[in-house]
Amino acid sequence: MASNRWWVYQRERFPIWRHGFLIAAVCFGVLTFSMPAADVRRPAPAGRWVAAFATVFLFFLQLRIADEFKDYEEDRRCRPHRPVPRGLVQLGELKAIAAGAAALQLGLALWVSPRLLMPLAAVWAYMLLMAREFFAPAWLKRHAVIYLFSHTLVLPLIYLYVSACGWFAKGQPPPGGLGFLLALGFFTGLVVEIGRKVWAPTDEIPGVQTYSRLWGCKAAIGVWAAAVLAAAISLLLAAGRHGSTAPLLGLIAVLGAAGLPCVRRFMTLAQHRDAERIERLSGIFALMTHVGLGLTVWINR
C-alpha cells in the first residue's frame, strides 16, 4: 500500500516523532527568548508558535529530501538498502513533496505576517545552495571541516526565521542577545551532526565519510565535546540577557555528569552501542537545553 511505503520511508529517513519533539523544543526556546515580555504569557501568539513549528519541520523535511538527491549516486553504490536506491520511493515523488512543503511554508508566512517572506527567502536560498553543494561538490568533499561548517550555517538562518516570528513579524526590534542565540543554533547543529557521524570502527562503510573515519575516534569525539562546550557557553550568554542563568548552569552540570561516562567509554572501547549513546546524547542535549532556555526566560519574565 502507498501509505505503508511512506510510513516506512519516514521511519528510516525522517522519523517524525523524534524530529517533531526536537523541533518543538527549539521553537519553544527560540520564540520564548525572542518575543517581547508582554507577549510571552498571552494566548494570542499561539498562531506564531504553530506556524514556526510547522515551517521548521518542513525545512528539515526539505533538507532530508535534498540529501536524497545529492547523495543518490553514493547511496546507490554504498547504501543500496536505503529507500530511494531500493525503489521504495522515487525522487520525483520527493521533489513534489518538497514543492508542496514550500507552498505551505509560503502560506504560513503570509498568514503570520508578510514580513516573514524575507527570512523565509533567505533560508530557501541557502538551502538551494546546499542542494547544489555551493557549486563546488568535489572541492567540498576534500575539505571536510569547510563542508561541515557550510552545511551547518543553515541552522542560524532557521533560528533567525523562528526568532523573527516573535519580533520581526510585529515590526518590533530584535531581542538582546540575538547573536548568542544564533551561535547556539550553529553549535547545536555541530553537536547533532558530528554526534550522528561518530561511528564505531566496525560500523564504518567503505566509501561513506564519517568524522570518526576522517579524524579518528578520539579526535572526532574531542571535536564533538568542544561543540557541546561552545553550545553551552552560547546558551548561557543568550540566557544571561534575560535574567538568571543558575537553572541552566544546573542543567548543563547534570547533562555533563550523565554524558561524561559515555564519552570516556567511547574513547576507550568505541563499540557500536557506545556510538549510539553519543548520537542519543546529542539529541538529548539539544532538546533539554532549548526547553531549559524557554523555561528560564519564561520564569524570569
Image (spheres, rainbow, N blue to C red):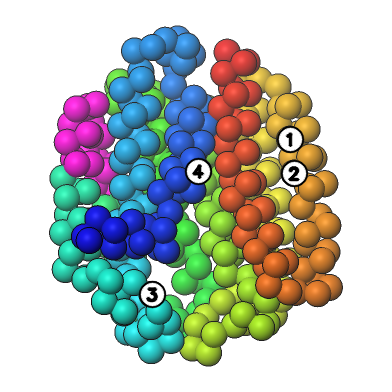
How far apart are the alpha carbons under marks 3 and 4?
Answer: 24 Å
Q: Earlier in the sequence, mark 2 or mark 4?
A: 4
Q: Earlier in the sequence, mark 1 or mark 3?
A: 3
Whether residue 131 appears in this view of the structure is no
Task: Determine which residue is flagged by label 4.
Answer: 22
Above or below: residue 34 compared with residue 137: above
Residue 211 occupies which quadrant of the picture?
bottom right
Q: Tell me which secondary structure the magenta stretch mostly adopts.
A: helix
Q: Residue at x 70, y 22 (%)?
A: 244
Magenta stretch?
104-122
How far apart are the alpha carbons under marks 1 and 3?
Answer: 37 Å
Query: CB under 8 Å between callouts 1 and 2?
Result: yes
Task: Determine which residue is flagged by label 2.
Answer: 255
Q: Name the spot of residue 153 as percent of width and height, x first.
A: 45, 56
Residue 119: within the magenta?
Answer: yes
Q: Name the spot of residue 298 as percent of width and height, x first.
A: 57, 18
Decide: few, some or many residues near mark 3? Use Cα within 10 Å; few <14, some 14-19, many ≥20.
some
Question: The residue tagged with tag 3: helix, strand or loop?
Answer: loop
Tell me which amino acid carries mark 2. Answer: Leu
Task: Determine which residue is flagged by label 1.
Answer: 251
Residue at the farthest front position: 1
Above or below: residue 66 compared with residue 75: above
Above or below: residue 114 compared with residue 269: above
